Amino acid sequence: DTEVTQTPKHLVMGMTNKKSLKCEQHMGHRAMYWYKQKAKKPPELMFVYSYEKLSINESVPSRFSPECPNSSLLNLHLHALQPEDSALYLCASSRGASTEAFFGQGTRLTVV
Amino acid sequence: KQEVTQIPAALSVPEGENLVLNCSFTDSAIYNLQWFRQDPGKGLTSLLLIQSSQREQTSGRLNASLDKSSGRSTLYIAASQPGDSATYLCAAALFYSSASKIIFGSGTRLSIRP
């Protein structure tokens, strides 16, 4: 099983809403990642968790708040987003720092 | 700061041709170099992973090479098919404490004409 599952697949939210994106893997991977991808652009790294600890934060605005409650689950909490935050949000995991990364199918987020 | 560049940005070839996609990176201190495929609006599918100590990897009609000293990787696709049409992304995994940063190139949009 090399699957990374992201829910929901699509999300429309208003600028005053609070929502969460969820990512789950059962491969025993200890590194998990959040990426943001705008149309026709490559994915941009947002956060990296290693052994459930936040290792990398790429200067992401505080309206995005990551959480790693256990080794299989990664959340991204959203509040007070702007329309320019509309994008495909991708989650990935890898066994360690030097091993193959597997990506989920993404959550298509639209902020209205 | 690591930069990853892909050339060409777009490529259209007739079915059956062999083709090469190029990727270059500025910082040779990488864990690995990974090639992905992305279909429109979808997630990323891992194609090949080359560790920093390796020179090449093969999977079916795909062959990827890595030259760390020159900061280059190539993805060779043999006997291309219309189903190969997609965006191909290379990504370099960089040392960073206990984790790694995976930095993507801008991608090559490949179109295979029947």
Image (spheres, coloured by chain):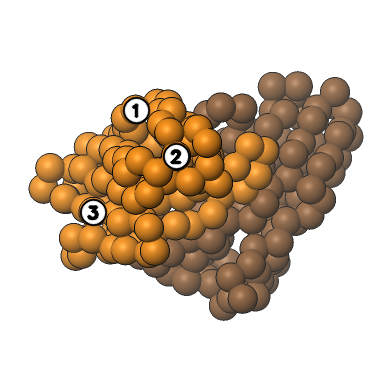
Chain colours: A brown, B orange
Please tell me which residue lies in front, B49 or A18: B49
Residue drawn at (40%, 43%) of the image: B16
Res. B8 mark: 1
Sequence-earlier tag: 3 or 2? 2
Query: How far apart are the alpha carbons under marks 2 and 1?
Result: 18 Å
**Location of residue B105 (image quadrant):** top left
The x, y position of residue B14, in whole percent, is: 43, 33
Which chain is disc 3 placed on? B
- Position of B9 compared to B82: left or right? left
Which mark is nearer the camera, 2 or 1? 2
The x, y position of residue B83, in whole percent, is: 55, 46
Please tell me which residue lies in front, A81 or B16: B16
Check chain identity for marks 3 and 2: say if they share one. yes
Q: Name the residue under label 2.
A: B15
Query: How far apart are the alpha carbons under marks 3 and 2?
Result: 23 Å
The x, y position of residue A69, in whole percent, is: 70, 66
**Location of residue B96 (image quadrant):** bottom left
Query: How far apart are the alpha carbons under marks 1 and 3?
Result: 17 Å
Q: Which amino acid does label 2 sit on?
A: Glu
Which chain is disc 1 placed on? B
Secondary structure state at the residue bearing disc 1: loop
Please tell me which residue lies in front, B84 or B96: B84
Secondary structure state at the residue bearing disc 3: strand
Res. B65 mark: 3
